[in-house]
Amino acid sequence: MGAHHDGEGTNFAVFSAHATKMDLCLFSGDGLTETARISLPERTGDIWHGHVAGLSPGTVYGYRAHGAYDPERGHRFNANKLLLDPYTRLLKGQFTDHPATLGYEARAATEDLSFDPRDSAPHVAKSVVHDPALFPTGVARPGTAWEDTLIYEAHVKGLTQQNPGIPAPLRGTYEGLATEPMLEHLHRLGVSAIELMPVHAFLDDGFLLKRGLTNFWGYNTVGFFTPEPRYFGPRGLAGFRDMVRRFHTAGIEVILDVVYNHTAEGDQRGPTLSFRGLDNASYYRLLQGRPRYYVNDTGTGNTVNVAHPNVMRLVLDSLRFWVECMGVDGFRFDLATTLGREQSGFAPGGGFFDALRQDPVLAGVKLIAEPWDLGPGGYRLGEFPPEFAEWNDAYRDTVRRFWKGEAHSAQELGARLLGSAGEFDRAGRRAWSSVNFLAAHDGFTLADVTAYTQRHNAANLENNQDGHHSNHSDNCGVEGPTTDPAILARRRRRQRNMLATLFLSQGTPMLLAGDEMGNSQSGNNNAYCQDSPIAWVDWDADHSGLKGFVAHLSAFRRAHPALRQSRFLHGGVRPADGLRDVEWVDFAGTALNWRDPGLSSLCVLYRCSAEAPLAADREDSVFVIFNRAAEPAPVVLPVPPEGWKWMVGLDTTADIQEPKLITGTHVDVESEAVMALFLVDTGPPS
């Protein structure tokens, strides 16, 4: 599929089940002038194809699909609209928000039922025949085990634009992401995988352009094989592969946030750019009995029909391309419930998931689901196949609620600390299936969770009506910026407590870029349209040593296998020593009263799982103390084995994290604090 040069010419192949003719349109090198129009001579099944002798890499082209323009039956063919090849790997020119890109006359009384005869070619990007040498296959990968993974979610431009250590020409580019200052920063944090927000070619929504804004996040895909050109640096397309190669050399995996649930063409009022014009009734899910309109399970206007075999092939081919040719190590599937929804509803064993899991290329990469969409029964946390990890928003909300001081939140926190086994411990799934996070691109940053009770999205020009209504945030006494030292200290302590909770939980931790340095978006919890300092990471934000603290948390987690187990802990008795793999106690060392609605202080003792193989390290034990109360308190420590003592390895109230040996039977914990201790072998008593 797509356009492929074979040395003698180029073969073109494109899918359409309902077209009556398919024209290949060739353009001058600058993409401005159509120089030839050739009807593809062959049709094999629903694939239109043909070989054009003498065409070389760099040839600019597009398609015009002929067929019925009958929106009431779901068909929107309009040969006046130049269409992007869904398989193109390169783009020439740009898409513009021009009425000629619409398949209908915008001013007509019948709106999308009308037909627009204008040529859209001057206003759209074109496809380009690629040089096969640009996309070699075969990449050596870090292959980090899930239980050793720390994910860092980042935006290509947002992370690098204000980093003073990156050369100015590389800021905001793929190449800038993998410069030495960035690699040093990620290494210090112990990051093992960087998860990039969408880098598939995408469009800026027309309504945003009219407001003078852009689609900064990029969840508006138009090309599933094409790296977004706005992030190209001096080396252009090659810069993406350079970035991946440098990350791999540094031992860091690259995960892409991919959007296969909808496209940039929107609903029936949107432009005709590619899929809609090639075969609207195949590429999209249309309302049953009303095919003029689109199923909108994504909230973006349309829903890709992944259940169609040729559309599924497109998605799988795209995923393989990014793995084999671009070197990426995994994918986070935006609104993944959409990809598993079939006629009967969401199906964990549905066609797309089955195809993905059996694929010899894709079965070996990291797969992460965003387990919800806006469709019926769209929230599916814990219901994806065993090969998937899932974003756990319940973890985020619980940790925020606990440190905010809400009743009953301690009970929920207990479940989240153990990897949310209630949701994930089934069908052989592992504890790493829960991707735990405190903040993500969508919502408040961690700093803003502690500084704002209300969202402040006025800059989005939507009357502050957009974004999440319920953030479980708390401004600690003053909304927004303050100079009050007591409030600032409380905010810093709460951020440290929440970060410590993240790194001391079973599951896969994910850190939002900038949270390790107190980055704020000024209370904007929906910065999707803010290509500005609002959404760019402020590298000067850390005034309290937070980066060093996060680096210590990460190192502490790496040092203790009891904190990053692949198996769930259920309090099972370990055969080797008769001890339980997890124990809960109060500060007096007695059984925890889980029925107390105001429970605010608890302790958990992690040991390696009773279900772990005999070869596992069974000696590691970590005792974690959570004190949300306003008063300090003594905590009775579990009796250590003979020859062992407890060592304090983490204290969120300490400016300097230095190990401290405990010689007595208890330890004092400060108010609003987290402390973690571990057992050390001190030898036989003298």
Image: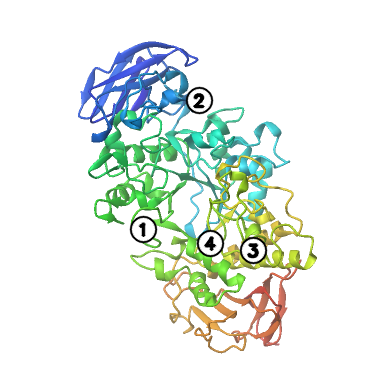
Real-space Cα separation, disc 4 to disc 3, in angstroms: 28 Å
- Check disc 4: other Cα within 10 Å, few if <14, some if 14-19, many if 20+: few
Residue pointed to by mark 1: 384
Residue 362 visible in the current orientation: yes
Q: Earlier in the sequence, mark 1 or mark 4?
A: 1
Q: CA distance from mark 3 to mark 2?
A: 45 Å
> Reading the chain from its start, which is encountered first: label 2 or label 1?
2
- How much space separates mark 1 and mark 3, taking CA atoms? 30 Å
User: Of label 2 and label 4, which has the lower sequence position?
Assistant: 2
Q: Of the residues tagged 2 and 4, which is closer to the observer?
A: 4
Lower position in the chain sequence, tag 1 or tag 3: 1
Disc 2 designates what residue? 94
Q: Is residue 287 left or right of residue 98?
A: left
Mark yes or no: residue 178 visible. no
Between label 3 and label 2, give the one nearer the viewer: 2
Quadrant of residue 654 within the rendered picture: bottom right
Label ID, residue 470: 4
What residue sits right under mark 3 in the picture?
553
Please rate how many residues cluster around mark 2, counting C-alpha atoms within 10 Å: few if below 14, some from 14 to 19, many from 20: few
Residue 80 at what x, y percent from top left? 35, 19
Q: Position of residue 573 (x, y in %)?
A: 44, 82
Task: Kindly identify the residue that appears in the image at 24 percent across and 51 percent down.
Answer: 343
